Image: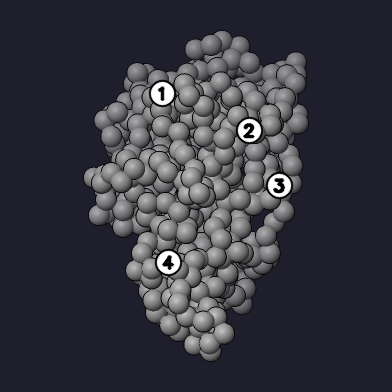
Amino acid sequence: MGRNDRKRRTPLATKAIAASAALVLGGGGLLWAQMNASAHESNSSGQNQTKAAAASVATIACPDVGQQLTNVPQNARQGVATELANLDKQITEAYARLASTRQAQANDASFVQNAIVGPLKEKRAATIDRIRIDIQRVGGSVNAAALKQLAACTTQTANNTTAGGQNNGGGNNNGGQNNNNGGQNNGNTAAPSASASASAPAANNGGQAGNGPTAADFVDITKVAPNVQAKPQKQAQASTGSFTTRCGVNANKNHNTDNVIVAPGVTNGAHHEHDYVGNQKVNAFSTNDSLLAAPSSCQNQSDLSAYYWPVVRVQDGSQEFDANALGGGKEGNVGKILTPQSAQIKYVGSPASKVVAMPQFLRIITGDAKTLTNGLANANAHWSCTGFENKVQLTEQYPICPQGSNVVRTFAFQSCWDGVNIDSANHRTHVAFADPASGVCGNGFKAIPQLTMRLVYKITPPTIQNGVVKNAYAVDGFPEQLHKASTDHDDFISVTKNNLAAKIANCVNTGKKC
């Protein structure tokens, strides 16, 4: 798979958040509400002007604390992770309140500020201060004044919810970080209709649960110009082999809404369902020891690694097992969960050098579940169709595949490691992508076998009629992220026995296909 280096236009809201977060830390997301006024009221009436003001409020943008935490002492990380999970929970609860109080918002222009945004700021301020205390208590340092600035969230109108433009590009499946961006945004909705029922779901925001996706989140792949660029040229010391591990497709439906990497010890820390293959005992309370003692779905029983990703659902009205559960229907993740037809997990080499073995318990997250908030700096979503993968890769839209073609999700994890840490405070800085042009690891980082995944789904193509998508499919996500294609992400914990990590590296280094 190639890459696309076009730079995208960063929306003003994202720029403002990034500037704030850059001070110290950053937490949260975007909250979506549908505000509706009565169709028969005159726009010239004072009462309706107040309602119109309320109706124009569509989102609340909050700084993302977790991504800016790059220097948290090890013995403070559990406490900080718990508080970051609290920030996510607060946003989810505020989103639910926005979605359930549309009539009150239409009747009172100050309702969102007084009843939702203000209380949310107070909760966030207390939580962020606990993060400060956790860090300082063990000798760490933070800028307390800058931290305080991250508590407030700002309201946005419906036409200012853009996190990215229409994107027809993909990241580099050979290790380049996804910097593909640009173009006119087609991923968000217009202002809510004045004629919509206040008690109706947020239909203008699309999706069975009212929080996406919309028609603009899909594109006919046959109408997208080829965008896959060439991979880096292999150098003399390239590691050209590959190692494939066969771990199934999660046919046994091993799901949960935890995320032991980001929110250890916190039930429903992901706020969406994951598929698990490989290690079969992964949850919020897993430890290194428990992972080593767990069974594996992999044919190679020395591979106990945890491979997990958010499920894909078809929003066909189905009531899944989690329809009334947190992380499922209660948080806007609805419809039939699809099991991949195939799931290929392969480790590949570096075009520039030999690789070193992955360390035991190395944790890597690729992609960003909060791109609607954070922008696309860490996005690494790749969507395509069988027969088109070498031509078109999409990040910001889901493909509508032609007859006989299936939807494909691919992931290419970071392939450079700092040589010391198996994790980092923000779960990113201990690993990195190689230079997309040369494949070389920078900053003294070492090349490791690059984990790649390819998931294939048989999906009836969505149709779009009068601006409305039918039979939509979408990746699970945080409810306020509106099920955008760019929020796709993947998680990995390296757990091996019987010297398997070294065997993988040796296979890759010697040019074998194992």
Name the residue that disc number 2 marks.
Answer: 223
Name the residue that disc number 1 marks.
Answer: 342
Amino acid type indicated by mark 1: Ser
Q: What element carries label 3?
A: loop
Neighbours of disc 3 within 10 Å: few (<14), some (14-19), many (20+): some
Q: Residue at x 69, y 32 (%)?
A: 225
> Which mark is nearer the camera, 4 or 3?
4
Ranked by sequence position, the earlier of labels 4 and 2 is 4
Distance, label 1 to label 3, CA atoms, is 32 Å
Distance, label 4 to label 1, CA atoms, is 42 Å
- Would residue 412 appear left or right of 309 to someone viewing this image? right
Q: What element carries label 1?
A: strand
| Location of residue 197 by image quarter | bottom left
Neighbours of disc 2 within 10 Å: few (<14), some (14-19), many (20+): few
Q: Which residue is drawn at 61% across and 47% down?
A: 378
Name the residue that disc number 3 marks.
Answer: 182
- The x and y percentages for residue 37 are 45, 75
Name the residue that disc number 4 marks.
Answer: 196
Distance, label 1 to label 2, CA atoms, is 26 Å
